[in-house]
Image (cartoon, rainbow, N blue to C red):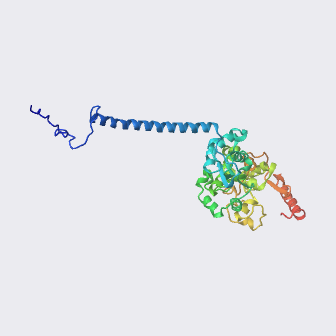
């Protein structure tokens, strides 16, 4: 018997197989290509799961933070603070605005702590605009208690009495602030930003209103002088200055000049009467005064000295438009800053025919009025006797 024909041996490396030369293990479940495709499909699934897991973590974390915020107290400092902070409350600030600014300046630990403290304080809604002395790292409650008390507002309170010239006002400002006279004079030399009325023609004399001002730590020479002009505007509005000037056939600037003369010459209830004397004299162009006011204070202003001085005969000859002994009519402008009473008196003069007045007692301010020149001379003698026997102010 002959041997059976041997079966052909199959070559594992098929010359037509595109993967020839690679060792690909054979799988009993159906070949290498399907296995490869399943392996690649797992990658996107894993990525998706990772993203979902990350989002879940972030969501849970945020949720926990929200819950903690709802059920835990806001961060707050415990101590009274340290150092120094000049904190400003600005117009329109809410409790949240104030809390945010306090946190930004390191005064409180959190906005929420301050807002929570303010919500339990009835006076928190009345916090006034201004600067307050606070500290770094204060408790919200302690910071709030400083802010609700207007007595804590930082201000440099400066009082300017009635009857001051600009030079006198600058003396006070230089003495009470850290600025120099030159700093203030630069503003007066370029007065546009001050808001002076057009009829002042850039001259602040008479338009820096006498009052008490609370200047904060951020004030400048310009802001201080502007505040004084703004206060004058209020006084002028209260007196109806422009309407009163028109009724008296004057310009507003002329009325302010009269007010400054009234301030220099009178006090109290005498002011409207002195105002009337001035108007009567201005009209008396053919009478005994020939339209001349003959006010000592204008001569002193022309000489650049205190307005209360008593001028000599030589002083009365000074060549100046402010010399109301030598010139008829009003001087060119105000000689000092009048207050409310003087502006009101100039706007509303008393009724009377007086042409003369003399203050016969410098201590009490007693002033006598007359339309008679002879009686006027008698009043002057009374003043001389007073000066000789009762006063060293003459």
- Front-lying residue, 214 or 75: 75
Q: Is residue 67 left or right of residue 364?
A: left
The number of numbered discs placed on residues in the rendered structure image is: 0
- Front-lying residue, 212 or 236: 212
- Front-lying residue, 35 or 107: 35
User: Which residue shows up at 61% across the image and 58% down it?
Assistant: 187
Residue at far bottom of view: 314
User: Which residue shows up at 57% across the image and 37% down it?
Assistant: 64
Rendered location of residue 331, percent (x, y): 68, 57
Is 180 above or below relative to 54? below
User: Which residue shows up at 58% across the image and 54% down it?
Assistant: 192
Residue at far left of view: 2
Q: Is residue 366 left or right of residue 54?
A: right
Is 23 above or below relative to 174? above
Rendered location of residue 160, percent (x, y): 73, 55
Is 117 above or below relative to 30? below
Rendered location of residue 231, percent (x, y): 68, 49
Quadrant in which residue 110 is drawn: top right
């Amino acid at each position: 018997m002959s041997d059976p024909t041997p079966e052909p041996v199959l070559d594992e490396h098929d010359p037509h197989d595109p993967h020839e030369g690679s060792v690909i293990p054979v799988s009993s479940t159906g070949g290498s290509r399907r296995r490869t495709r399943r392996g690649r499909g797992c990658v996107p699934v894993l990525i998706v799961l990772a993203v979902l897991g990350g989002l879940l973590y972030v969501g849970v974390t945020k949720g926990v933070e929200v819950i903690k915020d709802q059920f835990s107290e806001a961060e707050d400092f415990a101590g009274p603070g340290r150092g120094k902070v000049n904190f400003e409350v600005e117009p329109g600030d809410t409790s949240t605005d104030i809390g945010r600014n306090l946190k930004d300046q390191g005064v409180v630990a959190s906005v929420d702590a301050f807002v929570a403290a303010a919500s339990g304080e009835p006076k928190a809604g009345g916090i006034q605009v201004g600067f307050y002395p606070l500290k770094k790292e204060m408790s919200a409650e302690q910071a709030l208690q400083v802010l609700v008390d207007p007595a804590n507002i930082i201000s440099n309170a400066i009082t300017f009495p009635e009857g001051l010239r600009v030079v006198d006002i600058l003396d006070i400002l230089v003495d009470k602030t850290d600025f120099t006279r030159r700093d203030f004079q630069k503003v007066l030399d370029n007065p546009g930003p001050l808001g002076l009325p057009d009829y002042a023609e850039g001259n602040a004399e008479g338009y820096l209103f006498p009052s008490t001002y609370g200047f904060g730590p951020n004030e400048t020479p310009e802001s201080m002088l502007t505040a004084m002009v703004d206060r004058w505007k209020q006084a002028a509005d209260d007196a109806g200055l422009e309407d009163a000037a028109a009724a008296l056939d004057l310009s507003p600037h002329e009325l302010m000049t009269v007010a400054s003369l009234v301030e220099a010459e009178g006090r109290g209830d005498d002011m409207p009467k002195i105002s009337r004397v001035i108007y009567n004299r201005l009209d008396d162009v053919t009478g005994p005064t020939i339209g001349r006011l003959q006010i000592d204070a204008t001569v002193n202003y022309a000489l650049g000295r205190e307005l209360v001085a008593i001028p000599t005969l030589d002083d009365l000859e000074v060549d100046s438009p402010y010399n109301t002994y030598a010139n008829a009519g009003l001087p060119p402008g105000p000689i000092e800053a009048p207050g409310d009473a003087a502006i009101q008196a100039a706007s509303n003069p008393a009724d009377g025919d007086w042409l003369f007045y003399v203050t016969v007692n410098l201590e009490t301010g007693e002033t006598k009025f007359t339309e008679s020149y002879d009686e006027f001379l008698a009043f002057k003698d009374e003043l001389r006797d007073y000066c000789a026997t009762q006063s060293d102010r003459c």
